Amino acid sequence: MKIIPLILMGCGGVGRQLLHHIVSCRPLHAKQGVHLRVIGVGDSRSLVVASDVLTMELNDKILLETCRIKLGGGSLSDLSNFGERKLFLNTEATKKVIDIATLLGKSTGLACVDCSASSDTVNVLKQVVDLGCCIVLANKKPLTSTIEDFNKLITHPRRIRHESTVGAGLPVIASLTRILSSGDPVHHIIGSLSGTLGYIMSEVEKGKPLSQVVKVAKSLGYTEPDPRDDLSGMDVARKALILARLLGQQINLSDIKVESLFPKEMGPDVMPINDFLDGGVLALDSDIQERVTNASSRGNVLRYACVIESSSSRCEVGLQEFPKDSPLGRLKGSDNVLVVYSRCYNEQPLVIQGAGAGNDTTAAGVLADILDLQDLF
Amino acid sequence: MKIIPLILMGCGGVGRQLLHHIVSCRPLHAKQGVHLRVIGVGDSRSLVVASDVLTMELNDKILLETCRIKLGGGSLSDLSNFGERKLFLNTEATKKVIDIATLLGKSTGLACVDCSASSDTVNVLKQVVDLGCCIVLANKKPLTSTIEDFNKLITHPRRIRHESTVGAGLPVIASLTRILSSGDPVHHIIGSLSGTLGYIMSEVEKGKPLSQVVKVAKSLGYTEPDPRDDLSGMDVARKALILARLLGQQINLSDIKVESLFPKEMGPDVMPINDFLDGGVLALDSDIQERVTNASSRGNVLRYACVIESSSSRCEVGLQEFPKDSPLGRLKGSDNVLVVYSRCYNEQPLVIQGAGAGNDTTAAGVLADILDLQDLF
């Protein structure tokens, strides 16, 4: 039996779903001869750890109880009645992760799984990498920090997986990695990597005003609490940055040309959210509608896309026109799509499309990543 | 430096392209800290092996010369003037592969790469697997032999890769494996997995007679020398069988419902190829055209597809109608496409599309497979 000891950082929707997947996959993984030994679970404030990380684990009962407590908005310290484990708080929690990585990096190995949405994990992850451990990320922030941080994190390319940082569980990173490792040079990538913006642009295409579509999207829970977090394009820019860096571009987030769908004077620092939703966004309707109409008169549709070119080091995200019958033009609803052009995929590009959001899919991508590391354990 | 010793079986188009890729990727792989040590290259009759398989390799000059000789229709024995290596013929060649696998399986490890199109390799591959070595297949035949052979070959799922058996280099197997390992149950798969039949059905859709399209496709080199090898659907059936078995169906090739595009009385055993091309196939024109027209009247198009369902163990290949704006309906030319429905990819299936043929792409898929095994060496 192959045993993979792991620490989970982040107990939000994806982290909790991952714990559920791990527990429910026990029989499947047993059949495959693998056991995921969860030795620690942490959130932004604390870390729960098995009493002896070399031999023990947080059992499934604790893992599910952790999910229940965190879903209810509780704290990991509420777990106090559940069997043998230790709780560490704040800096002690971070220190404990490093201690464990130091110990296990030299013996059984360790996978540090970051399902948080925090920028704060990058320092821990860099140390963990140095200690010979593996890292698995659903969190985009560490990989979109400085290029120095990125290069540090990918020092050992076989010990890092991060499928769910782009397109949720869609096999986008795995496929790109395969293409690159086979010496097939990727010329350029075009993608629609925000389900939210995909949905919004599909609806606007039908003739609905942007302001109305944004409100409906928010009420359906498709957007971030403040929809400007989607409309700014920064989430897409982060995904584009990760892809560009995979292609070898030594660039930072600030090097990416990002088109925001609202002007600076409507930004979250300047305008309260309700003023934006009830006023500001209305002023954007006619411009977007005009662009949609113009595109349509040319047989095109408007999509919020990322474009990454290897030769020119071009990396930009924003609204672009695409022919109606192209992979991006055909896109409907909240699907994500990535289109890859390389030597092998030249006239007929590689197209990967599907659901690019959702905790279930994202966590499944993380789990596949963890299992893909098993030969290192 | 990670060293992967490998033996290549098969020096046809894919095998030769693989050797070219290996040689041209030397600098890239050196940067990644991997070296592919080619210790043997074999065709259907012979095997050239490095003098000492534990320490030596066939150098790049020999590999390229092998490609040149085989491209010109020559034999591996024509290599006799090229430095230190040994030649084994017929049963001696097979015996030598087993000898090497016995030796390296216990020490450095070995990857046996089957780029042949032969049914004869399955016995060697089964022994190699037993000896603890890895196998990488572009050859569909070993995996479409009996279910017992299949189960034997996948005894150690982490030691086998076979991306290029379905959809050439398209990341179809890698993606399915990821989905399955994450415990996301695949409900059904629909695919168009023959570039040749994809091209033929696209052209027939435009109103051209099947007989004419087949002749053009043959003259362009899109079909097998006898186009009935494509039109029989058996190549698609083999790919469907591999996918069905991956989903756990314990079935054989004979269990698959296969629709041939020509009747038995026009089969290769009954009718000479020229009689088929100049006569037989003409009799098929009106039926196909009628089906295309009927489909079109329902807003559909006709595609040669495979359908695999997990729950019902259904696995069939043949002509089917698809809505014009579905992933298969949209397909043009010789692209392949695979559509996967699972728990995570339910309303929005996973769609993987792109060039599904060509020696370059197929060999790139094999090379990515070999590199994906590196943690076992």
Image (spheres, coloured by chain):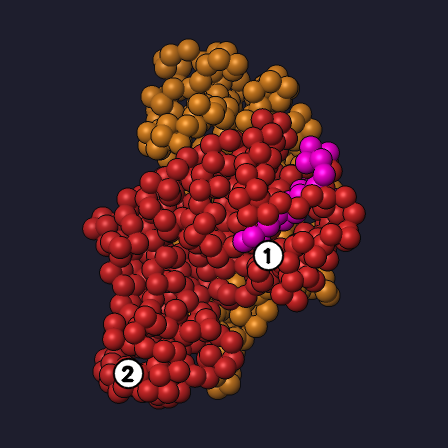
Chain colours: A orange, B red
Q: Residue sitting at 35 percent across and 63 percent down?
A: B234
Q: Is residue A158 visible?
A: yes
Give the SS element for disc 1: loop
Q: Find the distance from the CA under tag 1 to the CA under tag 2.
A: 37 Å
Quarter holding residue B52: top right
Q: Residue sitting at 25 percent across and 72 percent down?
A: B264
Q: In the rendered structure, does residue B41 fall within the stretch colored magenta?
A: yes
Query: Which of the two labelled residues, at mark 1 and mark 2, occupies the earlier sequence position?
Result: 1
Stretch of the chain drawn in magenta = B30-55
Give the SS element for disc 2: helix
- The local crowd at label 1, few if under 14, some if 14 to 19, many if 20 or more residues have their Cα within 10 Å, is many
Q: Quadrant of the N terminus of chain B?
A: top right
Q: Position of residue B206 (x, y in %)?
A: 38, 86
Q: In the rendered structure, does residue A183 fall within the stretch colored magenta?
A: no
Q: Position of residue B17 (x, y in %)?
A: 63, 59
Q: Residue sitting at 29 percent across and 76 percent down?
A: B266
Badge number at residue B284: 2
Say if A247 sits above or below B261 in the image: above
What type is the residue that disc 1 sits on?
Cys
Q: Residue sitting at 50 percent across and 36 percent down?
A: B128
- The local crowd at label 2, few if under 14, some if 14 to 19, many if 20 or more residues have their Cα within 10 Å, is some
What type is the residue that disc 2 sits on?
Leu
Q: Chain of mark 2?
A: B
Q: Are marks 1 and 2 in contact (CB under 8 Å)?
A: no
Which residue position holds label 1? B11
Side of B25 relative to A330 (left or right): right
Q: Nearer the viewer, residue B31 or B63?
A: B63
Quarter holding residue A367: top left
